Amino acid sequence: MTSTYAVLSEGLEKRFGEVRALRGLDLAVPEGSVCGILGPNGAGKTTAVRLLTTLLRPDAGSARVAGHDLVREAAAVRERISVTGQGTSIDEDLTGRQNLRLFGRLHRVRGPAGRTAELLDRFGLTEAADRPASTWSGGMRRRLDLAASLVRRPDVLFLDEPTTGLDPVSRTLIWDVVRGLTAEGTTVLLTTQYLEEADQLADDIALVDRGRVTHTGSPAQLKSLVGAHAEVVVPDTDTLARAAAVLDRLTGAQPSFDHERNAVGAVSKDPTLTIPLLVRALDTAGVPLLDVSLRPPTLDDVFLRLTETTPPETTGATGTTDEKERAA
Ligand SMILES: Nc1ncnc2c1ncn2[C@@H]1O[C@H](COP(=O)(O)OP(=O)(O)O)[C@@H](O)[C@H]1O
Ligand SMILES: [Mg+2]
């Protein structure tokens, strides 16, 4: 029986000593879609990727990946997936082309030269292809890393923060490639800290906080969970606090201040909030106004709003250092 989910996990748990990195991770990623796992540093994103790519064994829970049981059929899972981690898996002494050919031979890809040339082209690396990777920029290496993970056309591709710290050119190229992959039937699971990235690429987003999925939905569905972002600009600092109190009452959200502009804003959960309503409430409270605005929520707003009731347990969580994920 073929499953319609490329990744289906239930109650995945992983503990590192005292740290419960995953506390029951449930994911359902339909075949041919892009799933964005969005969460702050330390949320458990990398741990999730390492479990789902068989690099780590779960302490509890189960998952099917690319149609196979993650633990009992780990070898079959490995055959069908690729992973690009935050570390780079390329050989610095080889040229870009040699690196890709090496991957092609390792995975017994037919016609490795053709596939290599195609991937170099797709990632904008043709010109530099015959120079050693050691001479390449960080962005080019990351692109090569991703190209390497595509040499053998995986059913499911896992990308752990593929564009963190990258220049805009590399980011855009990687986004374009990811968008193209689903057209070829590849399912993509990517982790990111960038809301914009999830918004741009993901069909569905799973918000992960402290080892659990707290919300799931399409970017539009998540945005509809919050009403709008309201902002009030007042003439002076004295009235700012009163404006904030009104906003607080109307939105039930923690207002945020922009002291330079004497502005205060808040993300409303209430979709019925309107400008007239805002103006009336502020007027009744005797708050003089320069400007009042309501704009549709961004994913940033959603994230703030949905996670504000659950502040991180510890501050300064460091997350894992870069790992040579493919080394395992
Ligand atoms: N190998 C490890 N040993 C100890 N703690 C770890 C290890 N890997 C991850 N952790 C901890 O597990 C939690 C989740 O980490 P991680 O999955 O790397 O989060 P993210 O990728 O979302 O930043 C963090 O608190 C991190 O410090
Ligand atoms: Mg990580």
Image: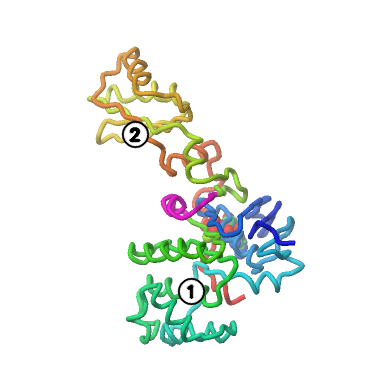
Give the residue displayed 36% in from the left and 74% down from the top: 124
State which quadrant residue 37 falls in.
Answer: bottom right
Give the residue displayed 28% in from the left and 34% down from the top: 259
Q: Position of residue 40 (x, y in %)?
A: 50, 51
Q: Which structural element holds mark 2?
A: strand
State which quadrant residue 285 falls in.
Answer: top left
**Which span of residues is magenta-colored?**
193-205
Of the residues shown, which amino acid type is indicated by label 2? Phe
Camera-side residue of 122 and 294: 122
Of the residues shown, which amino acid type is indicated by label 1? Thr
Q: Position of residue 252 (x, y in %)?
A: 47, 26
Up the image or down, 157 lies above or below 297; here it is below
Q: Which residue is mark 1?
A: 88
Label 2 – label 1 distance at C-alpha: 40 Å
Q: Which structural element holds mark 1?
A: loop
Give the residue displayed 53% in from the left and 49% down from the top: 205
Q: Quadrant of the N terminus?
A: bottom right
Q: Which residue is mark 2?
A: 257
Up the image or down, 220 lies above or below 239; here it is below
Q: Position of residue 159 (x, y in %)?
A: 52, 64
Of marks 2 and 1, which one's residue comes earlier in the chain?
A: 1
Residues at circles 2 and 1 in contact by the CB criterion of under 8 Å: no
State which quadrant residue 32 falls in.
Answer: bottom right
Residue, far top: 284
Q: Residues within 10 Å of mark 2 (few under 14, many from 20)?
A: some
Q: Position of residue 25 (x, y in %)?
A: 65, 52
110 horizontally vs 169: left or right: right
